[in-house]
Image: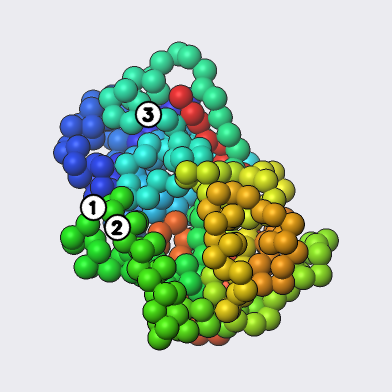
Amino acid sequence: MRIALIHNPTSRRNRHDGNEFYQAGRERLGNLCISVHHEGKLLDHVRQLHEAGVELIVLNGGDGTVSAALSAIEQVYPLDRLPAIAVLPSGNTNLIASDVGFGLRGPEALDRLFSERPFRSSMRAPIRLTWPGAPERRPVLGMFGGCTGYARAVRIAHSPTVLKFAPHNLAVVLTLVSSIASLVLRRSRQKWLQGNPLRWQQKGAEVAEKTLQGNGQSFIFLVTALEKLSNGIWPFWESGTNRHGFHFLNVSAFPKRLSGALLHLLRGRVPDWLRNHPDYVSDLVNKGMMLETDSEFVLDGEVFPAAADGRLMLERGPLFRFLQA
């Protein structure tokens, strides 16, 4: 198959590597090795790859790079002839690579891509994020996201104070510590726990009544199209299958037994009391769900402002094949 490489020079690990890997890619792929860090130019580059008959696109970057590339690919390629994807983990966050990553990066990844040995592969359908009341906003594909408390925590992680003085792994720790500290201090605890207004409505799904719709305040809302997360964390009721849809979790404002719930969710365990507790709702969405909230929405690390009418749609996107070494 014809191979192309999309290289993000601003991704964290690529900045440390310098330009060596990109130059090696140019030697092997010529003009099909593209260095791009401006999302606005990505669509034109993907059009060129489609016109050149590219069947495998290698993405050298983090989750944001993967999300932007998948979104552009969906707009350009016919849905019945989508290219295969290989993800090289080189960004600030690499949740996608931890599930469906190629497993190699640098010159070793290039050697493996051009070898004659067959690849393993996994199929995943990303989540498509749209804003029904704002059709001028382009759809975005991504694998992990959320709003309300999750968006607030990501804002802390993206703050200049954390990014300037802490390397990535420490920044993640500081984000968690800041979030937990906010729950300890009475004044900030009230603000965090009261969350944001959130209503949701699943469409065309045969689901339990309590997961069909929600109407109230949300402490935290999460979604994922991945089948596993890092370090054994899995805060969703169903197992990690992506075959029938994507997962969501909503934790209501001022949830009861929060400390106990966090201990279980961080370990990927869901005891019966948690599964049946009205403050914690999780389901597998096979069609889509409409959300109404004043919260920003975060998808693969990118923060998207709320629409004027507060509505956003989450749907199952097209099925991609991810290659592994």
Residue 78 lies left or right of residue 152; in this view the side is right
For the residue labelled by badge 3, is the local secondary structure a helix, a strand or a loop?
loop
Judge by depth and name the residue closer to the eye, 217 or 109: 217
Measuring from the top left, give residue 178's x and y in whole percent: 35, 68
Judge by depth and name the residue closer to the eye, 51 or 103: 103
Q: Which residue lies at the image location 50% right of the left edge and 38% below the top edge?
A: 100
Which of the 4 image quadrants contains residue 208? bottom right
Judge by depth and name the residue closer to the eye, 131 or 226: 226
For the residue labelled by badge 2, is the local secondary structure a helix, a strand or a loop?
helix
Q: Which residue lies at the image location 25% right of the left edge and 64% below the top edge?
A: 162
Measuring from the top left, give residue 156's x and y in whole percent: 33, 69
Q: CA distance from mark 2 to mark 3?
A: 25 Å
Res. 129 visible in picture: no
Q: Which residue lies at the image location 54% right of the left edge and 25% below the top edge?
A: 120
**Number of numbered labels in the structure image:** 3
Q: Which residue lies at the image location 46% right of the left edge and 24% below the top edge?
A: 325
Q: Is residue 271 above or below residue 186?
A: above
Q: Which residue lies under the disc numbered 1?
A: 167
Q: Which residue lies under the disc numbered 3?
A: 104
